[in-house]
Image (tube, rainbow, N blue to C red):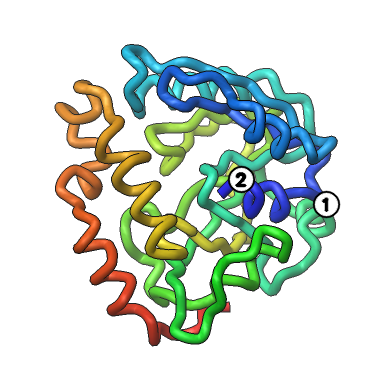
Amino acid sequence: MIPYFLSHYAYADEIIVLFNDHGKPVDGPTEKLILSYPNTRIEPFDYPHNKTDYVFATGVLNRAISKLDCDWAFAVSGDELAFPVGMRDAKATLQDADGVVIKACFWNVFRHRDDKDLDPTLPAIWQRRHGWPDRSGAGCVKPSVFRPAAGVSFGIGSHTCSIPVGRGVESSIRFDGAHWLSADPVLSIQRRMRGRREMVSKRTLNDGMGSQFFDITEKAIREQCDSLLDSPQLF
């Protein structure tokens, strides 16, 4: 996801990559790719026991955003590509936005029968535009855009946030977004199995967080992707 994520948010004044690879340092090619964008900064962190822990990750995120000094920021995972409704210019949209938190409504996108293989040299957002039209499911709407000065803090998975009393209200505008967890079968297998199912902490397992990944199989992922080859265009 790195080249697609960075190219999508390249307009940002700064991209802070909170990086963890379960105990392994940032390898040379990955570091070179990230830093090929002059507005990027890598902040590595370590999970306890080198296993993904959602509670711990939330603390890492909230400590990072508490240090920000900017008008607006995005708190997004590596597979979340948010954009203004109607594909308006993001900076112009935020310049006129009210409130202190903007919710993004993400579509889950899948490879369409007519789609070509992903190409990291091309703009990401136009490469996967088909998928589930329904955005009412759990995790589809997230408070992804916010004013750091408001003192916002996020809950598990950034699915919720809290605004201190008297520091502002939710914005009247919304962003759209494409969730790339299943944008391609190979990508989905890597992220849902090797990136999630096989690397979670005992606390995460015991709390049932990310339970949608616990019993997933490669066969099930491929069947789901195949079933959505003719899904409608979303944007």
What label sits on residue 2 in the rendered view?
Answer: 2
For label 2, the SS is helix
Residue 71 percent location from the top left of the image: 78, 37
> Residue 219: image x %, image y %?
20, 62
| Apparent side of residue 185 relative to residue 220 in the rendered image (left or right) | right
Vertical placement of residue 48 versus 137, above or below: above
Viewer-proximal residue among 184 and 150: 184
Find residue 81 and name its label: none
Marks 2 and 1, how far apart in space? 27 Å
User: Which residue occupies 56% across, 77% down?
Assistant: 116
Task: State which tag comes first along the sequence, 2 or 1.
Answer: 2
Name the residue: 60% across, 71% down.
Answer: 127
Return the residue at label 1.
Answer: 95
* Amino acid at dot 2: Ile
Residue that lies at the very extreme toward the front in this rendered image:
28
**Image check: 60 left or right of 217?**
right
